[in-house]
Structures are given as C-alpha cells and as structure tokens.
C-alpha cells in the first residue's frame, strides 16, 4: 500500500516531542513522574513501530495524537500556577481555554475515533485491533483527567483581595 508520508512525519514529530518532554520531566522532577514517563516511553515506542511497520494504522494513530493539542494550553496553566499567578485574569482565561480545548480534543475526538475503527474492524490486522482497543482506555483516562487536571479549582475566578482569600 501507499505510505502515508504526512502521517508518518506527524508521528515522528510526536516521538521527538515525547523525547524532549521526558528530558524536561527528568530535569524538573515533574510529578507524577512514573505514570507520565511510562506513557511517553510506551507511546513513543508504539508510534515509532506503527510509522515503520504498520502504515495502515498511521492515520488512526494521528487521530489519537490530535488529542495532544491540549498540551500547550495545559503547560501554560501549569506555568501560571508555578508562578503563583492564580489571581490574574489571564490564568482564569487559560483555565477556561483548557476546558474548551479538552472537551472536543480529548473526549469527542476519542469518541469519534471509534467510528472509522469499527467500520473497518473485520479487515484490520492484530496490531490495528490493539491500537483500536486503546480508544476506550484513552476515553476513560481523559475523563478522569478532566476531573483531576482540568476542573481542578473550578470555577477559576480571579481573586480580587490578594493573598488572604
């Protein structure tokens, strides 16, 4: 079959990001380190393998990778929290932006992923079945992360009185 060059390039960029992010997590002592480190290593290895050995699965993997579009916003929220900028309107805006990005990119996109997967289920190879079974796991993980990461501290109203509130 035809090699999905653009999709493979996207997976290579994702793998490079995972390597860069692992370096940053180790350097900063990010917590929880072990689950995120495992996620990055397993995801990076899987994407490398798919890009090289299972070209038919590249586009399915790219659909799942689109959920990572929330990462830059989450990183900005974390930076604002690290700087103690909880009382700034920009922090409140970032929290709402994260929620607005999370719902379509982490929940609806993963749900959509199942439409083409189950349409082609009977013609898929074993590696593609394994990839497809990650969808429900990711939906569960992203739903839990919505509660723990995204909705943490809701409603994120900028405090007006300073540190005493």
Image (spheres, rainbow, N blue to C red):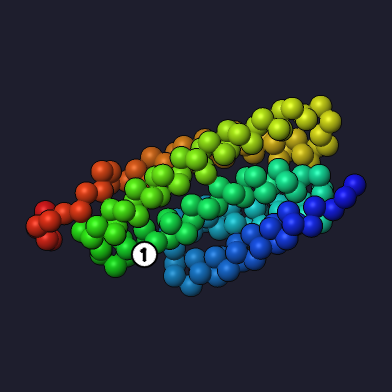
Residue at left 38%, top 50%?
97
Q: Residue at x 16, y 54 (%)?
A: 159
**Is 147 placed above or below 68 here?**
above
* Disc 1 element: helix
| Image quarter hosting the C terminus | bottom left
Can the viewer see residue 54 in this picture? yes
* Left or right of 32, for residue 49: right
Q: Which quadrant of the figure has residue 77? A: bottom left
For residue 137, say whether it is visible: no
Q: Residue 52, how many percent across, how many down?
A: 81, 56
Residue at (29% x, 57% y) in the render: 91
Q: Residue furthest right?
A: 1
Residue 114 located left or right of residue 102: right
Q: Identify which residue, 103 or 43, lies in the foreground.
A: 103
Check disc 1: other Cα within 10 Å, few if <14, some if 14-19, many if 20+.
Answer: few
Q: Is residue 29 above or below residue 106?
A: below
The residue at the point 32 percent across, 63 percent down is 80
Residue in the foreground of this view, choosing between 23 and 92: 92
Percent across and percent down for residue 98 are 40, 49
Is 153 on the left-hand or right-hand side of 120? left
Q: Position of residue 103 (x, y in %)?
A: 46, 40
Pointer 1: what residue? 79
**Where's residue 101, x and y in %?**
45, 47
The tally of labels here is: 1
101 over 133 or under it: above or below: below
User: Relative to 15, is 152 above or below?
Assistant: above
């Amino acid at each position: 079959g035809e090699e999905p060059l653009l999709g493979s390039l996207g997976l290579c960029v994702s793998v490079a990001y995972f390597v860069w992010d692992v370096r940053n997590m180790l350097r900063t002592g990010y917590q929880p380190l072990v689950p995120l480190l495992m996620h990055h290593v397993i995801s990076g290895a899987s994407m490398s393998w798919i890009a090289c050995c299972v070209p038919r699965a590249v586009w399915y993997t790219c659909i799942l990778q689109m959920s990572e579009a929330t990462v830059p916003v989450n990183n900005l929220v974390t930076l604002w929290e690290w700087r103690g900028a909880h009382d700034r309107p920009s922090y409140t805006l970032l929290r709402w932006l994260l929620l607005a990005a999370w719902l379509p990119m982490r929940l609806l996109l993963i749900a959509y992923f199942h439409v083409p997967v189950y349409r082609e289920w009977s013609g898929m190879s074993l590696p593609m079945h394994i990839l497809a079974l990650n969808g429900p796991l990711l939906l569960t993980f992203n739903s839990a992360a919505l509660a723990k990461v995204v909705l943490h501290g809701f409603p994120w109203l900028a405090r007006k009185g300073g540190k005493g509130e």
